[in-house]
Amino acid sequence: MINNLVFVILFLLGFYAILVKKNLIKMVIGLNIMEGAIFYWFISITDRGGAIPIVNGTQVASQMNDPVPQALILTGIVIGASTSAFLLTLVIELNKFTSSTNPDQIGGMIED
Amino acid sequence: MSITLILLIIVPLVTAILIPFIDVFSNSARKVLVAFATLLEFSIGMFIIASNFNAIMDNSFFLTYYLGEWIPPIGITLSMDMLSLFFSTLISISLLLIVTYSIGFIGHHEGKYYVLIFLIWAAMHGIVLTGDIFNLDVFLELLLITSAPLVAFKRNRNGTEAAIKYMFYGTIGGLFVFIGVVLVYFNLGTLNFADISQNFSNLSLFVQKIISFFFLTGIFIKMGVFPFHFWLSKAHSACPSSISALLSGVIVKVYVYVFIRLFWNVIGFDVLVATGLNHVILVIALISSIIGHIMALYENDVKRMLAYSTIANIGMIIAVLMINTKLALLAGLLHVVSHLLMKVSLFTATGYLLQFTPGHKRADLKGVAHKNMLIFSGFTIVAGGMVGFPPMIGFASKWYVIKAFLADGLHWGALIIMLGSIFAFVYYIRYVITGYKKISLGPPDKFRLILTVFYREQVVTDIAFFFVIAVIVSGIFFKLMFGPIEGAVQVIQNPSLYINAVLGM
C-alpha cells in the first residue's frame, strides 16, 4: 500500500513540476521524477521478498524474485536517459534563440 | 517461423547505423546505400505478399517469428496477420515514395536526415509486427525520439519550440502506456499480446477499467485527439514538408494501428462496452474532429491548416471505429488509406509550391498557380478529395464513414462529419482561390534558378504527381482494396484468430 502511495505522490510531484514550473529544465526534471516514480513502483510491487536471481539447480523458482521487471526497468532507464538528454539539448538550442528557458515565451504547453 | 519478419526491422536499423560511417568516406556511396536499402526494404515487404499470395487470398495468412526461439508466451513474438500486413504495406509504399521525394527535397545535412528516417522506418515496422506489449512501448519511444529531431530539423526557433512540445507530450503519453504495461504485468504476469488477451477478462472490472484508461490516455496523447491536441499542429508544420508528410500521413496511422490492436485484439472491445468507455471515446473523437475543422478554418498558415485537418480526420477515424460494426471498421480502415494518400499528397505538393512563395501565409500563396500550374492543379484536385468530391478516394471513404454512422442510427454523428466536410470545403477553397488569383509574372528569378539545381526539382514534382494520380486512381478503383481490408476487419473482429495463431492452439 505504501508503495502505491509513494508512487502517486512522486508521480503527481513530477506532474506538478511540468504544469507549474516556469523553467524548461525544471520541467525536464519533473518528467524524470515521473519516470523514476514508475520504475520505483514497478520494482517494489513485484518484489516477493525472495532470493536474488539467477538461481542454481537446488532452489525452486517460486522462491526467487521475478527478474522480468528488472529487465524492463533497465530498458526503461535507458529510454528515460536518452529522452531527457535529447530534451535538454533542445532546451539549450532554444536558449540560443531566445536567451531564456521560460516555457511561456514558447507559448506554454497548452497554447499552440 | 519466417525470417522475413525480423528482416523488415533489421534492414532499416542496420542501414541507419551504417550511414554515418559511410558518410564520412563518400557522399555518393551513402546515396547508393540509401537507395539500395530503401528498395531492399520495399521488396522484402512485396516478397512477403508474393510468397504468401494464396494464403492472403483465402484469409488464412499468418506469419510468426520467435526471437531467440523462445516459444510464446515467454519470449518476444513477432507476428504478421492481415491487419499488420495492411499497415506494413502502407508504411513500405509511402516510405519508399517519401524517401524518393526527400532525395530531391532535402538539400542539406542529408546524412543525419536519412539516419533518422531509417530509424523511424524500423520503429514503425517494429510497432506493427511486435506481439509483446513492452516491446511495443519501446518501439513507441523509439518512434518518438527519432521523429522529434526531424521536427527540429530546420534548426530555427519555431522548429525547436515544436520539438520541445512534441517531446513533452510524447514522453508523457509514453509514460501512461508504460503504467499500463506495469499494471498488465503485475496483474497477469505476462507481456505477450495473445496471453494477455486470453486472460484479460478474468480481471476485476475495476482493474480492466484502470488499464484501459491508461492505455487510452497514452495513445490519445500520442495521436493528438481532442484534449491533447495542442502539440500536433505546431509539430506537424514546423518541419520540412517531406517530414510533415511522414508525421501527418504515416506516423499518426501507426498510432491508429496501436489503438486498434490494443483495444480490439488485446484488451478486447467488450471491456470498452462494459465500462461504457466506447460512448465517451465516440463523443471525444467527434469533438476532436469538429475542433480540428474549426481551428483549420481560423488558421492562416497553409501547413498548420493541413495539420489541423489531420486532427479532424484522426478524430473521424477513431469515431467511426468506435461503432464497431463490420461496415464501420471497413470505413475506418478505408479512411486510413484515403487520409494517408491525400495528406502525403497535399504536403508533398505544398512543400514544392512553398519554394515559389515568400512565406507560408495564405496571402503569400497569391498567384502561385501561375508560377506552377500543374502542381497547383494537383493540389486543387486532392483538396477536393479531402472535402469529399468524387472521383477522389476521399469521396469513397467519407461515403462509407457516413454510411456506417447512418446504419447504426447515429444520425448526429453523420451530421457532424458532413458539417466538417462543409468547413473543409470553406478552408480549402480559400487557398485555391488565392492560388489562382491573377498576378503579373516578373522576369525569371535568379534565386529560383539556384534553388532548381539545389532541390533536384524533377524528382519532387514526379512524386507529387504520382500521389495525385494515386488519389484519383484509388478513388475510382477503391473496391479493389476491399479484399485486404475485409481480411483485416476479420482479424479485428475475432481476437481468437490472433490468440490461436500466436499460441499455436
Image: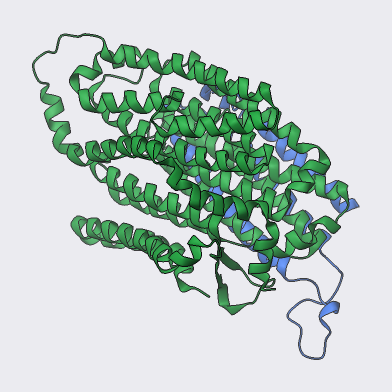
Chain colours: A blue, B green
**Residue at the left extreme of this rendering:** B443
- On screen, residue B81 versus residue B273, left or right, reads left
- On screen, residue B353 versus residue A77, left or right, reads left
Above or below for B359 versus A97: above
Q: Nearer the viewer, residue B324 or B441?
A: B324
**Residue at the right extreme of this rendering:** A1
Q: Quadrant of residue B502?
A: bottom right
- On screen, residue A2 versus residue B468, left or right, reads right
Above or below for B264 versus B279: below
Above or below for B264 versus B357: below
Residue shown at the point (43%, 38%) measured from the top left: B151
Q: Quadrant of residue B447?
A: top left
Q: Quadrant of residue B419?
A: top right
Residue B237: image location, x then y, percent:
43, 29
**Residue at the bottom extreme of this rendering:** A58
- Report whether residue A84 is seen: no
Residue B388: image location, x then y, percent:
45, 25
Residue shown at the point (68%, 50%) measured from the top left: B264
Residue shown at the point (51%, 30%) measured from the top left: B398
Q: Nearer the viewer, residue A55 or B99?
A: B99
Query: How many marks do you count on the picture?
Result: 0
Residue B433: image location, x then y, percent:
32, 12
- Report whether residue B310 is seen: yes
Above or below for B397 versus B416: below
Q: Nearer the viewer, residue A57 or A34?
A: A57
Residue B184: image location, x then y, percent:
76, 57
